[in-house]
Amino acid sequence: MNGAPGPLEAELLEVALDAAARAVDLIHTRRPADLGVRTKSSATDMVTEMDTASEALIREVIAARRPGDTVIGEEGGEEVGGDGGITWWVDPIDGTTNYVYDHPGYNVSIAAGVAGRALVGVVADPTHGRTYAAVRGGGARCDGTPLRLGPPPPLEEALVATGFAYDRERRARQGEVAGKIVGRVRDLRRMGAAALDLCSVAAGRVDAYYEAGLSVWDLAAGALIAREAGARLGSLDGGPVRPESVLATHPDLFEPMRELLLELGADRV
């Protein structure tokens, strides 16, 4: 990190890294033949028995080290541990569809913070063997190597990532917007895991990322990592980033990218 984290941040980061490593071992190294797949809100919104098992394992690690904290997970909802003051946001498998198909692009995402602001974030990418981590005010790293955005390309040369919602009709509208955007930038990538998209911005693997319809556990860790690497994050209406409206890119590219997205109706889908 840029500087030594404080005692609280250091402890939270250690817990997050430990929990993420154990979850990766469970879902990736010991991946079973039968994942126990079922659907939730739609045919494209899948969950596996490994999602549930991964979240249970992460909760156990957190509870053993910090029993007073609150944990909010995609599969288990909110569990209030006491008056610890720290909240954890857990996505035990971000990119479940990729995981089901054994396609690169799933991850374990864990963040911890206070008053809705992440203090630490960890995103573990099992397929590529990478672990991204950040501490608020302390920078971002991937496997110990500092991440820092370089100068951005012009808008027409930007490689842009996005994602689509689970609802079929909304996905179709988002696809129409994406079809317009692809002719105005270098190219478009749809990788299927929001946390890794944000880490891709941090690592320079894409130049910008936008999406609507996320949940806080999709966003918390990756957003901190991208921000600590030097990215600007916000919503398409110009306000703070929020799950319903996310744009992450180099500060110099943010307004041109936002204006293009507004022009093409990305804020209306």
Image: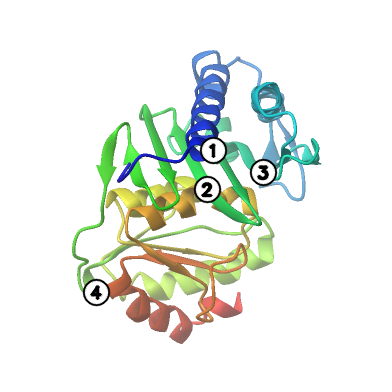
The label number, if any, that marks residue 119 in the structure image:
2
Q: Position of residue 29 (x, y in %)?
A: 49, 15
State the quadrant of the C terminus.
Answer: bottom right
Query: Crowding at label 2, few (<14), some or many (≥20) Cα neighbours within 10 Å?
Result: many
Q: To which quarter of the image does residue 188 belong?
A: bottom left
Q: Nearer the viewer, mark 4 or mark 1?
A: 1
Q: Is residue 193 visible?
A: no
Q: To which quarter of the image does residue 47 belong?
A: top right
Q: Nearer the viewer, mark 2 or mark 4?
A: 2
Label whose residue precedes the other's in the sequence (4 or 1) = 1
Q: Secondary structure at mark 1?
A: helix
Q: Nearer the viewer, mark 3 or mark 1?
A: 1
Label whose residue precedes the other's in the sequence (2 or 4) = 2
Task: Tell me which amino acid carries mark 1.
Answer: Leu
State the quadrant of the N terminus.
Answer: top left
Residue under pointer 1: 8
Dot 3 and dot 2 residues touching (CB under 8 Å): yes
Residue under pointer 3: 86
Query: Crowding at label 1, few (<14), some or many (≥20) Cα neighbours within 10 Å?
Result: few
**Looking at the image, which is closer to me, 17 or 96?**
17
Task: Tell me which amino acid carries mark 3.
Answer: Ile
Q: Secondary structure at mark 4?
A: helix
**Looking at the image, which is closer to me, 91 or 178?**
91
- Say above or below: 123 vs 116: above
> Is 103 placed left or right of 129 in the picture?
right
Label whose residue precedes the other's in the sequence (3 or 2) = 3
How far is the residue under mark 4 from the one under mark 1? 43 Å
The label number, if any, that marks residue 156 in the structure image:
4
Dot 3 and dot 1 residues touching (CB under 8 Å): no
Dot 2 and dot 1 residues touching (CB under 8 Å): yes
Q: Nearer the viewer, mark 4 or mark 3?
A: 3
